[in-house]
Image (tube, rainbow, N blue to C red):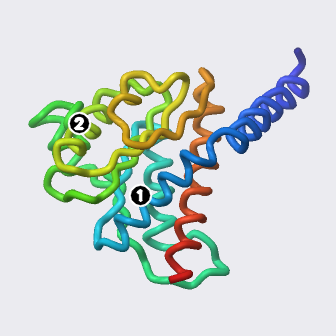
Amino acid sequence: MDEAARFAAMMEEGAVLRRRLAGEAADAVLGVVAACEAAIRGGGRLFFCGNGGSAADAQHLATELLIRLRSSVERASWPAIALTLDPTALTAGGNDYGFEQVFARPLSGLGRRGDVLFGITTSGKSPNVLRAFETAREMGIVTVGMLGVDGGPARALCDHVLLVPSPVTARVQEAHIALGHAVMELLEDRLIRA
């Protein structure tokens, strides 16, 4: 396959996946939106975590709420925290408690019952995301898994699952950001209506 055909195949694969999600994921997305709305209206916060590209997605989605999602909408800043942002906390946590605790440890100090934790993992197997889900569950924090493939062990730790059924990491990440943007836009619409 030449590069132009390969490029076209990548775009088509992503489009097919997103069309599939459009038909199958609406209930899951609306469940996540409702959980986030309840958290923010109740004075709670949204937390985000992930590794590598998923860490970038965690930061991206938190920023959409903290700063701005759509330039046409002027609204208050909403409490969203990416647990991936503080290199001092990440390195101290990794050094003192192990890398599997780098999200769970700060979540245990910042989170409270009724908050929401988004864990983003394309494999569903990231040990530090799994531990964050476990900590969230112990604390009464709602867990949202943005997962790939079949969800892996993370699926069982999530109250809400946004699953991208693909083994291709790049396609999963592309769909995760699309799902995340959909959640944030629907959430923004609900919060500014009231």
Query: Residue 120: where, in percent of width, then height?
Result: 44, 40
Farthest residue, direction left: 96
For the N terminus, the image quarter is top right
Q: Please, what is the three-letter code of the amino acid marked with disc 2?
A: Glu
Q: Going 43% across and 39% down the picture, which residue do you hit?
A: 145
Report the side of 67 relative to 173 (left or right): left
Q: Which residue is mark 1?
A: 35
Q: Going 72% across and 41% down the picture, which residue do you hit?
A: 23
Residue closer to the observer: 10 or 39? 39
Label 1 vs label 2: CA separation? 18 Å
Q: What is the number of callouts on the image?
A: 2
Which quadrant of the figure has residue 14? top right
Q: Which circle, 1 or 2, is nearer the viewer?
A: 1
Residue closer to the observer: 6 or 175? 175
Q: Going 47% across and 68% down the picture, which residue do you hit?
A: 65
Residue closer to the observer: 94 or 125? 125
Report the side of 111 relative to 57 (left or right): left
Query: Residue 6: where, in percent of width, then height?
Result: 84, 24
Report the side of 18 relative to 187 (left or right): right
Q: Which residue is mark 2?
A: 134
Residue closer to the observer: 12 or 93? 12
Farthest residue, direction top: 1
Residue 133 vertical placement versus 88 (above, below): above
Q: First in sequence, mark 1 or 2: give its number.
A: 1
Is residue 19 something that shows in the picture? yes
Q: Please, what is the three-letter code of the amino acid marked with disc 1?
A: Ala
Query: Residue 4: where, in percent of width, then height?
Result: 90, 28
Q: Going 37% across and 69% down the picture, which residue do you hit?
A: 40
Q: Label 2's element? A: helix
Is residue 91 something that shows in the picture? no
